[in-house]
Image (tube, helix red, strand yellow):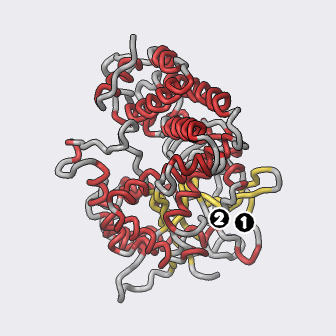
Amino acid sequence: MTRGRLVVHAHFYQPTRVDPFTGELPADVAAAPYRDWNARITAECYRPNAEHGSLARASWDLGPTLSHYLADNAPDVLAGFARADRLGGGENDGPAIAQAFHHSILPYAPLHDRRTEIRWGLRDFEARFGRMPTAIWFPETAVDLSTLRVAAEEGVAGTVLAPWQADTPHLEARAYRVDVGQGRHIAVAFYDGDLSGSVSFNAALTSDAEAFARDRVAPRLASPLADGSAPTIVIASDGELYGHHQRYRDMFLQALVDPAPGTPDRGFDVVTLASLLREPGGRPHREIRIRERTSWSCHHGVLRWGAECPDVPDGRWKTPLRGALDRLAGAIDTVTEAFTADLPGLDDIWRARDGYVDVVIGLVAPEDYAAACLGPHSPADDRRRLAAILEAQRWRLAMFASDGWFWDDPIRPETAQNLLAAARAVRIVDRLAGTNLEGRLVDDLSVLRSPAVGSDGATIYRHALVAVGQPPPGR
């Protein structure tokens, strides 16, 4: 056999923390001595990892909401990530892969939202790194066959999943492929649960990168697979682990993927995820089936983001929150279609939404984008109407970020951020169309309760608005 191979993948992501009404990032005293959490994590994690050069040897995804922050506030750090991708293989085997845009749990989303989230993620990647990605990271690795099929239709070749997402108890250390229907397949690398867990949660085992490589990794790569081919192990973890969640762990990553000169040969090579997912010599990977609606951080499928999951002491608030936002999204979509149906020159409002990512990431002004959709001689009022409804759609997508459901209680800032996105979207629509969707949203939110303090969702919604200086809805 040839030498065994190791892939070390880091999932870099931060939710958007901007005020949807002003576009400003509020200061947060909890992040002291830094202005806010994005600034603190950039200093502790993103900047040092970009400066070490280790990102050219590791594999990683950079979430679009994070890349947007870095582009505006730390462009040199974003440039360091882009440089690492070029040095690490670029077009063919570069270390960077894409991520679906808003970190929403795609198996919960309607099909047109899944497509937009994937298309926005691919476009953001292309804008940041100057190439199309080979693979994509699905938020929380949450997938089902429909989501994988959409990704394959958009040209995605592969992804990373947890071992328990495979519909088999016996995984070999290799890449596989999944039949997603309609003659399409997508390659999947299942990460090693034991090694990934050690890197993520066992500081004692990962204080010495050379010892970890020698004692934990090398023995697993020493023997060929049953067919004589070389094994490949994938380690996957949150990128913020490397310097933020664990101090100095950025140095561990550097030593693990890029050993210092003079280091004894380990007997295996470090490679990128893209090189693993590529089918060798045109021979297809072995086929495997996945378990539907599963993820990496919930052993109960995707319940953590929409129902009562045993991982959370009291998750009764999660179903009514998702129901309220799903109902709002459906109403906004109905208004969107009706409000734009008579716009001359507009062929497909959902295709227009897919392209609106160029406005979101700052490549095109809203008015210019609307003019491109409607034609250079379209009336100014029509352009403003289209730009406004697409901005509502932007925040309607953002209100489904997974963070709002992940934790134990809806009084946390992550849920407040989702509710602010909902408020921004619904107020645009109500103003444009004369509807009262916000009133219905408040009624729907009143059903849920905070386990900690007993406040209902309508109260939590009002408090979130007041905290950013916005008037609360009328009673």
Residue where numbered disc 2 is placed? 175
Outermost residue on the left side: it is 33
Give the residue at x 30% y 55%.
41
Marks 1/2: CA–CA distance: 6 Å
- Tell me where residue 423 sits by quadrant: top left
Give the residue at x 49% y 44%.
297
Q: Amino acid at mark 2?
A: Ala
Q: Are marks 1 and 2 in contact (CB under 8 Å)?
A: yes
Q: Which residue is at the front of the view, 193 or 66?
A: 66
In this orientation, does residue 397 appear? no
Is residue 353 toward the left or the right of residue 423 in the image? Answer: right
Up-down relation of residue 283 to residue 463 (above or below): below
Q: Position of residue 346 (x, y in %)?
A: 69, 42
Is residue 204 toward the left or the right of residue 96 in the image? Answer: left
Residue where numbered disc 1 is placed? 285
In this orientation, does residue 202 appear? yes
- Tell me where residue 134 sits by quadrant: bottom right
Count the labels in the image.
Answer: 2
Is residue 120 toward the left or the right of residue 144 in the image? Answer: left
- Tell me where residue 419 sits by quadrant: top left
